[in-house]
Image (cartoon, rainbow, N blue to C red):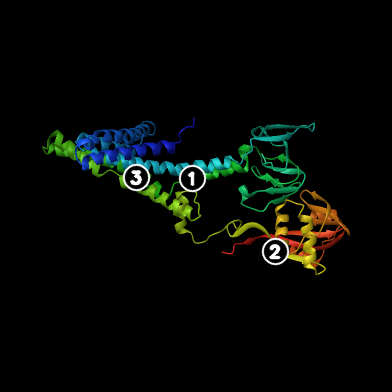
Protein backbone atom coordinates (compact mmCIF):
# COMPACT_ATOMS: atom_id res chain seq x y z
CA UNK A 1 0.00 0.00 0.00
CA UNK A 2 1.40 3.38 -1.01
CA UNK A 3 2.33 5.62 1.88
CA UNK A 4 0.76 9.08 1.99
CA UNK A 5 3.21 11.94 1.47
CA UNK A 6 3.22 14.98 3.75
CA UNK A 7 1.52 17.00 1.03
CA UNK A 8 -1.20 14.37 0.51
CA UNK A 9 -1.92 14.31 4.25
CA UNK A 10 -1.93 18.10 4.50
CA UNK A 11 -4.23 18.35 1.49
CA UNK A 12 -6.66 15.79 2.93
CA UNK A 13 -6.82 17.63 6.27
CA UNK A 14 -7.35 21.03 4.67
CA UNK A 15 -10.09 19.68 2.38
CA UNK A 16 -11.80 18.15 5.42
CA UNK A 17 -11.57 21.51 7.22
CA UNK A 18 -13.03 23.30 4.21
CA UNK A 19 -15.86 20.74 4.07
CA UNK A 20 -16.59 21.21 7.76
CA UNK A 21 -16.66 24.99 7.43
CA UNK A 22 -18.97 24.68 4.41
CA UNK A 23 -21.38 22.50 6.37
CA UNK A 24 -21.35 24.87 9.34
CA UNK A 25 -21.87 27.88 7.08
CA UNK A 26 -24.80 26.22 5.33
CA UNK A 27 -26.41 25.46 8.67
CA UNK A 28 -25.93 29.00 10.00
CA UNK A 29 -26.85 31.03 6.95
CA UNK A 30 -29.50 28.94 5.22
CA UNK A 31 -31.83 28.38 8.12
CA UNK A 32 -32.91 25.60 10.47
CA UNK A 33 -34.24 22.14 9.85
CA UNK A 34 -31.84 19.59 8.51
CA UNK A 35 -29.36 22.26 7.48
CA UNK A 36 -29.29 23.62 10.99
CA UNK A 37 -28.27 20.23 12.32
CA UNK A 38 -25.09 20.40 10.20
CA UNK A 39 -23.58 23.23 12.25
CA UNK A 40 -22.21 21.19 15.14
CA UNK A 41 -20.79 18.30 13.05
CA UNK A 42 -19.21 20.81 10.68
CA UNK A 43 -17.54 22.76 13.50
CA UNK A 44 -16.32 19.57 15.16
CA UNK A 45 -14.80 18.42 11.84
CA UNK A 46 -12.97 21.74 11.44
CA UNK A 47 -11.58 21.73 14.97
CA UNK A 48 -10.40 18.13 14.61
CA UNK A 49 -8.79 18.38 11.17
CA UNK A 50 -7.61 21.97 11.39
CA UNK A 51 -6.92 22.33 15.10
CA UNK A 52 -5.38 19.06 16.29
CA UNK A 53 -2.51 18.92 13.75
CA UNK A 54 -1.67 22.60 14.40
CA UNK A 55 -1.80 22.03 18.17
CA UNK A 56 0.52 19.01 17.83
CA UNK A 57 3.04 21.04 15.81
CA UNK A 58 2.82 23.97 18.23
CA UNK A 59 3.36 21.80 21.31
CA UNK A 60 6.25 20.02 19.55
CA UNK A 61 7.93 23.33 18.76
CA UNK A 62 7.35 24.57 22.30
CA UNK A 63 8.70 21.39 23.90
CA UNK A 64 11.63 20.65 21.57
CA UNK A 65 12.73 24.10 20.44
CA UNK A 66 11.31 26.33 23.18
CA UNK A 67 9.62 28.44 20.50
CA UNK A 68 6.20 30.10 20.59
CA UNK A 69 5.18 30.09 16.94
CA UNK A 70 2.11 31.21 15.01
CA UNK A 71 0.63 27.70 15.18
CA UNK A 72 0.19 28.12 18.92
CA UNK A 73 -1.39 31.55 18.54
CA UNK A 74 -3.90 30.29 15.98
CA UNK A 75 -4.92 27.34 18.14
CA UNK A 76 -5.26 29.46 21.28
CA UNK A 77 -7.31 32.03 19.35
CA UNK A 78 -9.66 29.33 18.00
CA UNK A 79 -10.09 27.70 21.41
CA UNK A 80 -10.72 31.09 23.02
CA UNK A 81 -13.32 31.89 20.38
CA UNK A 82 -15.13 28.63 21.13
CA UNK A 83 -14.88 29.29 24.86
CA UNK A 84 -16.70 32.62 24.58
CA UNK A 85 -19.45 31.26 22.34
CA UNK A 86 -18.02 32.08 18.90
CA UNK A 87 -16.87 28.68 17.58
CA UNK A 88 -17.64 29.61 13.98
CA UNK A 89 -15.07 32.43 14.02
CA UNK A 90 -12.52 29.99 15.42
CA UNK A 91 -13.39 27.51 12.67
CA UNK A 92 -12.74 30.16 10.02
CA UNK A 93 -9.28 30.81 11.50
CA UNK A 94 -8.40 27.12 11.58
CA UNK A 95 -9.59 26.53 8.01
CA UNK A 96 -7.56 29.42 6.62
CA UNK A 97 -4.55 28.27 8.61
CA UNK A 98 -4.93 24.69 7.33
CA UNK A 99 -5.05 25.90 3.72
CA UNK A 100 -1.88 27.95 4.30
CA UNK A 101 -0.14 24.84 5.64
CA UNK A 102 -1.11 22.91 2.51
CA UNK A 103 0.39 25.61 0.29
CA UNK A 104 3.63 25.45 2.25
CA UNK A 105 3.67 21.64 2.05
CA UNK A 106 3.26 21.87 -1.70
CA UNK A 107 6.31 24.13 -1.92
CA UNK A 108 8.36 21.59 0.05
CA UNK A 109 7.13 18.84 -2.30
CA UNK A 110 8.85 20.50 -5.24
CA UNK A 111 12.23 19.92 -3.60
CA UNK A 112 11.40 16.24 -3.05
CA UNK A 113 10.35 15.74 -6.69
CA UNK A 114 13.48 17.46 -7.98
CA UNK A 115 15.69 15.18 -5.88
CA UNK A 116 13.75 12.08 -6.98
CA UNK A 117 14.31 13.05 -10.63
CA UNK A 118 18.06 13.28 -10.01
CA UNK A 119 18.12 9.98 -8.14
CA UNK A 120 16.40 8.28 -11.10
CA UNK A 121 19.48 9.04 -13.23
CA UNK A 122 21.62 6.73 -11.14
CA UNK A 123 22.07 3.15 -12.38
CA UNK A 124 21.62 0.51 -9.71
CA UNK A 125 24.29 -1.88 -10.96
CA UNK A 126 27.59 -1.81 -12.83
CA UNK A 127 29.85 -4.31 -14.61
CA UNK A 128 33.15 -4.29 -12.70
CA UNK A 129 36.28 -5.76 -14.26
CA UNK A 130 38.43 -7.72 -11.85
CA UNK A 131 42.25 -7.94 -11.78
CA UNK A 132 42.05 -11.28 -13.60
CA UNK A 133 39.95 -9.78 -16.40
CA UNK A 134 36.65 -11.32 -15.36
CA UNK A 135 33.58 -9.07 -15.39
CA UNK A 136 30.94 -9.27 -12.65
CA UNK A 137 27.74 -7.29 -12.12
CA UNK A 138 27.84 -5.47 -8.77
CA UNK A 139 25.81 -2.79 -7.05
CA UNK A 140 26.87 0.70 -8.13
CA UNK A 141 27.09 1.69 -4.46
CA UNK A 142 29.85 -0.91 -3.98
CA UNK A 143 32.22 0.68 -6.50
CA UNK A 144 35.44 2.10 -5.07
CA UNK A 145 37.97 4.57 -6.43
CA UNK A 146 40.28 2.75 -8.85
CA UNK A 147 37.78 0.12 -9.93
CA UNK A 148 37.46 -0.51 -13.68
CA UNK A 149 33.93 -0.52 -15.08
CA UNK A 150 32.85 -1.87 -18.47
CA UNK A 151 30.30 0.32 -20.27
CA UNK A 152 28.29 -1.26 -23.06
CA UNK A 153 26.33 0.82 -25.63
CA UNK A 154 23.18 2.23 -24.04
CA UNK A 155 24.45 1.83 -20.47
CA UNK A 156 24.47 4.65 -17.93
CA UNK A 157 27.77 5.58 -16.31
CA UNK A 158 27.57 4.27 -12.71
CA UNK A 159 30.17 6.61 -11.18
CA UNK A 160 32.41 9.53 -12.10
CA UNK A 161 35.62 8.40 -13.74
CA UNK A 162 37.98 8.58 -16.70
CA UNK A 163 38.07 6.49 -19.85
CA UNK A 164 40.90 3.99 -19.86
CA UNK A 165 40.14 2.27 -23.17
CA UNK A 166 37.75 2.84 -26.06
CA UNK A 167 36.16 5.77 -27.82
CA UNK A 168 32.52 6.73 -28.17
CA UNK A 169 29.84 9.35 -27.83
CA UNK A 170 28.38 10.16 -24.41
CA UNK A 171 24.96 11.74 -23.92
CA UNK A 172 25.47 14.31 -21.14
CA UNK A 173 22.18 16.16 -21.61
CA UNK A 174 20.85 15.39 -18.11
CA UNK A 175 24.06 16.55 -16.43
CA UNK A 176 25.44 19.44 -18.49
CA UNK A 177 22.41 20.38 -20.61
CA UNK A 178 24.40 19.70 -23.80
CA UNK A 179 22.01 17.98 -26.17
CA UNK A 180 24.73 17.03 -28.65
CA UNK A 181 26.58 13.83 -27.63
CA UNK A 182 30.18 14.46 -26.62
CA UNK A 183 32.94 12.36 -28.17
CA UNK A 184 35.13 10.74 -25.54
CA UNK A 185 38.54 9.10 -25.84
CA UNK A 186 41.07 7.67 -23.34
CA UNK A 187 41.81 10.15 -20.57
CA UNK A 188 38.54 12.06 -20.90
CA UNK A 189 36.25 12.35 -17.85
CA UNK A 190 32.77 10.83 -17.73
CA UNK A 191 30.05 11.61 -15.21
CA UNK A 192 27.60 9.47 -13.30
CA UNK A 193 24.17 9.24 -14.94
CA UNK A 194 25.36 10.02 -18.49
CA UNK A 195 24.70 7.48 -21.27
CA UNK A 196 27.22 5.65 -23.44
CA UNK A 197 25.78 5.76 -26.97
CA UNK A 198 28.27 3.68 -28.92
CA UNK A 199 31.28 1.45 -28.47
CA UNK A 200 32.50 -0.47 -25.44
CA UNK A 201 34.34 1.70 -22.92
CA UNK A 202 36.50 0.88 -19.93
CA UNK A 203 36.18 3.52 -17.23
CA UNK A 204 38.32 3.86 -14.11
CA UNK A 205 36.25 5.16 -11.19
CA UNK A 206 37.59 8.43 -9.75
CA UNK A 207 34.79 9.22 -7.27
CA UNK A 208 32.36 7.06 -5.32
CA UNK A 209 28.64 7.77 -5.64
CA UNK A 210 28.71 9.74 -2.38
CA UNK A 211 31.08 12.30 -3.96
CA UNK A 212 29.84 12.07 -7.55
CA UNK A 213 28.48 14.80 -9.79
CA UNK A 214 24.88 13.76 -9.15
CA UNK A 215 25.50 13.69 -5.38
CA UNK A 216 26.73 17.27 -5.53
CA UNK A 217 23.77 18.24 -7.74
CA UNK A 218 21.36 16.74 -5.19
CA UNK A 219 23.06 18.72 -2.44
CA UNK A 220 22.85 21.96 -4.43
CA UNK A 221 19.18 21.41 -5.30
CA UNK A 222 18.38 20.63 -1.66
CA UNK A 223 20.13 23.78 -0.48
CA UNK A 224 18.47 25.90 -3.16
CA UNK A 225 15.01 24.59 -2.34
CA UNK A 226 15.55 24.99 1.40
CA UNK A 227 16.65 28.59 0.98
CA UNK A 228 13.70 30.74 2.01
CA UNK A 229 12.80 33.94 0.26
CA UNK A 230 13.55 37.17 2.19
CA UNK A 231 9.84 37.72 2.73
CA UNK A 232 9.49 34.16 4.11
CA UNK A 233 12.40 34.70 6.48
CA UNK A 234 10.90 37.96 7.67
CA UNK A 235 7.51 36.31 8.11
CA UNK A 236 9.06 33.58 10.29
CA UNK A 237 11.07 36.13 12.31
CA UNK A 238 8.09 38.43 12.77
CA UNK A 239 5.70 35.55 13.50
CA UNK A 240 7.54 34.40 16.61
CA UNK A 241 7.68 37.88 18.09
CA UNK A 242 4.13 38.65 17.03
CA UNK A 243 2.86 35.49 18.78
CA UNK A 244 4.51 36.45 22.06
CA UNK A 245 3.22 40.02 21.82
CA UNK A 246 -0.38 38.96 21.17
CA UNK A 247 -0.41 36.32 23.93
CA UNK A 248 1.05 38.78 26.42
CA UNK A 249 -1.41 41.42 25.22
CA UNK A 250 -4.35 39.05 25.73
CA UNK A 251 -3.24 38.25 29.28
CA UNK A 252 -2.83 41.97 30.05
CA UNK A 253 -6.23 42.72 28.50
CA UNK A 254 -7.88 40.05 30.66
CA UNK A 255 -6.20 41.44 33.81
CA UNK A 256 -7.10 45.04 32.92
CA UNK A 257 -10.78 44.35 32.18
CA UNK A 258 -11.11 42.13 35.26
CA UNK A 259 -9.57 44.91 37.38
CA UNK A 260 -11.99 47.44 35.84
CA UNK A 261 -14.91 45.35 37.08
CA UNK A 262 -16.05 43.50 33.94
CA UNK A 263 -16.02 40.20 35.82
CA UNK A 264 -14.48 36.87 34.83
CA UNK A 265 -16.72 36.25 31.83
CA UNK A 266 -16.49 39.80 30.51
CA UNK A 267 -12.70 39.96 30.86
CA UNK A 268 -12.32 36.56 29.19
CA UNK A 269 -14.54 37.65 26.31
CA UNK A 270 -12.46 40.82 25.77
CA UNK A 271 -9.20 38.85 25.84
CA UNK A 272 -10.60 36.25 23.43
CA UNK A 273 -11.79 39.02 21.11
CA UNK A 274 -8.25 40.42 21.05
CA UNK A 275 -6.82 36.98 20.21
CA UNK A 276 -9.28 36.42 17.36
CA UNK A 277 -8.92 39.93 15.94
CA UNK A 278 -5.13 39.76 16.10
CA UNK A 279 -4.86 36.29 14.55
CA UNK A 280 -2.22 36.43 11.81
CA UNK A 281 -4.17 34.80 8.97
CA UNK A 282 -2.99 37.37 6.46
CA UNK A 283 0.65 36.95 7.53
CA UNK A 284 0.49 33.16 7.38
CA UNK A 285 -1.29 32.90 4.03
CA UNK A 286 -0.06 35.89 2.03
CA UNK A 287 3.63 35.03 1.60
CA UNK A 288 3.42 31.34 0.56
CA UNK A 289 0.33 32.01 -1.54
CA UNK A 290 1.99 34.86 -3.42
CA UNK A 291 5.21 32.92 -4.02
CA UNK A 292 3.43 29.75 -5.16
CA UNK A 293 1.21 31.75 -7.48
CA UNK A 294 4.24 33.42 -9.04
CA UNK A 295 6.11 30.11 -9.39
CA UNK A 296 3.09 28.49 -11.06
CA UNK A 297 2.62 31.40 -13.45
CA UNK A 298 6.31 31.26 -14.41
CA UNK A 299 6.15 27.49 -14.93
CA UNK A 300 3.21 27.91 -17.32
CA UNK A 301 5.40 30.30 -19.28
CA UNK A 302 8.25 27.80 -19.43
CA UNK A 303 10.41 29.33 -16.67
CA UNK A 304 11.34 27.13 -13.70
CA UNK A 305 12.60 28.62 -10.42
CA UNK A 306 14.49 26.71 -7.73
CA UNK A 307 12.46 28.40 -5.00
CA UNK A 308 11.09 31.61 -3.60
CA UNK A 309 14.54 33.03 -2.87
CA UNK A 310 15.50 32.88 -6.56
CA UNK A 311 12.15 34.41 -7.51
CA UNK A 312 12.61 37.43 -5.26
CA UNK A 313 16.24 37.85 -6.33
CA UNK A 314 15.02 38.18 -9.92
CA UNK A 315 13.68 41.65 -9.09
CA UNK A 316 17.24 42.94 -8.71
CA UNK A 317 18.77 41.13 -11.72
CA UNK A 318 20.24 43.35 -14.45
CA UNK A 319 22.17 40.79 -16.54
CA UNK A 320 21.03 37.39 -17.84
CA UNK A 321 23.26 34.48 -18.91
CA UNK A 322 21.65 31.64 -20.89
CA UNK A 323 22.66 28.03 -21.40
CA UNK A 324 22.24 28.02 -25.16
CA UNK A 325 21.45 24.35 -25.78
CA UNK A 326 17.73 23.80 -26.06
CA UNK A 327 17.09 27.32 -24.77
CA UNK A 328 18.44 29.65 -27.43
CA UNK A 329 19.11 26.82 -29.89
CA UNK A 330 16.96 24.06 -31.36
CA UNK A 331 18.84 21.23 -29.62
CA UNK A 332 19.05 19.24 -32.90
CA UNK A 333 22.11 18.70 -35.07
CA UNK A 334 21.97 20.49 -38.43
CA UNK A 335 24.45 20.60 -41.32
CA UNK A 336 25.61 24.21 -41.49
CA UNK A 337 28.24 24.04 -44.23
CA UNK A 338 29.39 21.65 -46.97
CA UNK A 339 32.90 22.11 -48.41
CA UNK A 340 33.93 19.98 -51.40
CA UNK A 341 37.57 20.51 -52.30
CA UNK A 342 36.82 19.67 -55.96
CA UNK A 343 33.89 22.11 -56.06
CA UNK A 344 31.16 19.47 -56.59
CA UNK A 345 29.09 19.92 -53.40
CA UNK A 346 26.24 17.64 -54.55
CA UNK A 347 28.61 14.83 -55.50
CA UNK A 348 30.42 15.21 -52.19
CA UNK A 349 27.13 15.15 -50.24
CA UNK A 350 25.98 12.08 -52.18
CA UNK A 351 29.07 10.11 -51.13
CA UNK A 352 28.81 11.33 -47.53
CA UNK A 353 25.09 10.51 -47.26
CA UNK A 354 25.69 7.08 -48.83
CA UNK A 355 28.11 6.26 -46.03
CA UNK A 356 26.03 7.77 -43.22
CA UNK A 357 22.85 5.96 -44.24
CA UNK A 358 24.42 2.93 -42.57
CA UNK A 359 24.84 4.74 -39.23
CA UNK A 360 22.41 5.54 -36.38
CA UNK A 361 24.55 8.38 -35.06
CA UNK A 362 22.83 11.76 -34.57
CA UNK A 363 25.36 13.44 -36.87
CA UNK A 364 24.67 10.84 -39.57
CA UNK A 365 20.95 11.62 -39.26
CA UNK A 366 21.68 15.34 -39.72
CA UNK A 367 23.69 14.62 -42.88
CA UNK A 368 20.89 12.45 -44.30
CA UNK A 369 18.36 15.22 -43.64
CA UNK A 370 20.61 17.72 -45.41
CA UNK A 371 20.89 15.45 -48.45
CA UNK A 372 17.11 15.03 -48.64
CA UNK A 373 16.62 18.79 -48.30
CA UNK A 374 18.94 19.39 -51.26
CA UNK A 375 17.40 16.61 -53.33
CA UNK A 376 20.63 14.58 -53.35
CA UNK A 377 20.47 10.78 -53.31
CA UNK A 378 23.03 8.81 -51.38
CA UNK A 379 25.61 6.87 -53.39
CA UNK A 380 25.78 3.09 -53.25
CA UNK A 381 28.44 2.17 -50.69
CA UNK A 382 29.32 -1.43 -49.77
CA UNK A 383 31.18 -3.15 -46.92
CA UNK A 384 30.31 -0.38 -44.47
CA UNK A 385 31.75 -0.75 -40.95
CA UNK A 386 31.61 1.59 -37.97
CA UNK A 387 34.69 2.77 -36.06
CA UNK A 388 33.48 3.61 -32.53
CA UNK A 389 34.27 7.18 -31.55
CA UNK A 390 35.85 7.91 -34.94
CA UNK A 391 33.47 7.47 -37.87
CA UNK A 392 32.51 5.04 -40.59
CA UNK A 393 34.36 3.24 -43.44
CA UNK A 394 33.09 1.60 -46.66
CA UNK A 395 33.94 0.90 -50.28
CA UNK A 396 32.65 2.15 -53.60
CA UNK A 397 33.84 1.49 -57.17
CA UNK A 398 36.91 3.67 -56.67
CA UNK A 399 38.28 2.27 -53.42
CA UNK A 400 38.00 2.78 -49.67
CA UNK A 401 35.73 5.63 -48.61
CA UNK A 402 35.63 6.99 -45.07
CA UNK A 403 33.88 9.72 -43.10
CA UNK A 404 34.61 10.80 -39.55
CA UNK A 405 36.64 12.98 -37.25
CA UNK A 406 40.33 13.86 -37.15
CA UNK A 407 41.14 10.58 -35.35
CA UNK A 408 39.83 8.56 -38.28
CA UNK A 409 41.59 10.83 -40.78
CA UNK A 410 44.89 10.20 -38.99
CA UNK A 411 44.22 6.47 -38.94
CA UNK A 412 43.63 6.52 -42.70
CA UNK A 413 46.86 8.49 -43.23
CA UNK A 414 45.06 11.57 -44.60
CA UNK A 415 46.56 15.05 -44.30
CA UNK A 416 44.11 17.67 -43.01
CA UNK A 417 46.53 20.58 -43.43
CA UNK A 418 44.48 22.55 -45.90
CA UNK A 419 43.56 26.24 -45.41
CA UNK A 420 39.88 25.63 -46.17
CA UNK A 421 39.63 22.67 -43.82
CA UNK A 422 41.58 24.36 -41.02
CA UNK A 423 39.17 27.30 -41.11
CA UNK A 424 36.26 24.94 -40.35
CA UNK A 425 37.77 23.57 -37.15
CA UNK A 426 36.83 26.49 -34.91
CA UNK A 427 35.58 24.39 -32.01
CA UNK A 428 32.06 25.84 -32.21
CA UNK A 429 30.84 23.07 -34.50
CA UNK A 430 31.51 19.42 -35.31
CA UNK A 431 33.53 18.75 -38.46
CA UNK A 432 32.96 15.53 -40.45
CA UNK A 433 35.75 14.82 -42.94
CA UNK A 434 35.21 12.70 -46.05
CA UNK A 435 38.05 10.99 -47.82
CA UNK A 436 39.05 8.20 -50.16
CA UNK A 437 42.15 6.42 -48.95
CA UNK A 438 44.70 9.09 -48.05
CA UNK A 439 42.95 11.80 -50.06
CA UNK A 440 40.60 14.20 -48.29
CA UNK A 441 37.59 15.07 -50.46
CA UNK A 442 36.14 17.74 -48.19
CA UNK A 443 34.20 18.25 -44.99
CA UNK A 444 30.78 19.09 -43.60
CA UNK A 445 30.11 21.02 -40.41
CA UNK A 446 27.30 20.11 -38.04
CA UNK A 447 26.06 22.39 -35.26
CA UNK A 448 23.11 23.23 -33.05
CA UNK A 449 21.35 26.17 -34.72
CA UNK A 450 19.74 29.12 -33.00
CA UNK A 451 15.96 29.10 -32.73
CA UNK A 452 14.18 31.17 -35.34
CA UNK A 453 12.21 32.89 -32.59
Secondary structure beneath disc 2?
helix
Q: Quick check: 103 left or right of 85?
A: right
**Quarter that holds the C terminus:** bottom right
The residue to which callout 1 is attached is 225
Mark 3 or mark 1: which comes first in sequence? 1
Dividing the picture into quadrants, the one containing residue 371 is bottom right
Dividing the picture into quadrants, the one containing residue 61 is top left
Q: Which mark is residue 373?
A: 2
The residue to which callout 3 is attached is 284
Q: Is 47 rendered above or below residue 318? A: above
Instruction: Give x and y (percent) for residue 263.
Output: 12, 35
Q: CA distance from mark 2 to mark 3?
A: 60 Å
For disc 3, the neighbor class at 10 Å (few under 14, some 14 to 19, many from 20) is many
Q: Is 135 rendered above or below residue 189? A: above
Q: CA distance from mark 1 to mark 2?
A: 46 Å
For disc 1, the neighbor class at 10 Å (few under 14, some 14 to 19, many from 20) is many
Mark 2 or mark 3: which comes first in sequence? 3
Tell which of 367 and 190 is nearer to you.
Answer: 367
Secondary structure beneath disc 3?
helix
Mark 1 or mark 2: which comes first in sequence? 1
Q: Nearer the viewer, mark 1 or mark 2?
A: 2
Q: Quick check: 103 left or right of 438?
A: left
Marks 1 and 2 close (CB-CB < 8 Å): no
Q: Quick check: 14 left or right of 136?
A: left
Residue at 64 percent across and 53 percent down: it is: 179
Dividing the picture into quadrants, the one containing residue 327 is bottom right
For residue 450, say whether it is visible: yes
Amino acid sequence: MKRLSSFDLSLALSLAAVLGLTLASAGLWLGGGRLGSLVTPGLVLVYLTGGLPAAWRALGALWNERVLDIDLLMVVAAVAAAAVGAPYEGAVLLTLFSVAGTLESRALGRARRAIEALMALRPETAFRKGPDGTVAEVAAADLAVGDTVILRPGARVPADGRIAEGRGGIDEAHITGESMPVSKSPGDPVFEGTVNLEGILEVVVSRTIGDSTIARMIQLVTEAQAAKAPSERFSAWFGQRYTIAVLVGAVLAFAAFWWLGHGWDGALYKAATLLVAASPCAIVISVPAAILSALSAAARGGVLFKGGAALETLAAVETFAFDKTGTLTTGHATVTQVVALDGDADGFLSLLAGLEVQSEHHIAAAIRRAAVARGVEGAEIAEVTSRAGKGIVGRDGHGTLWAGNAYLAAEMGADLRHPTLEALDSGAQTVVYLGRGRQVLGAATVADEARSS
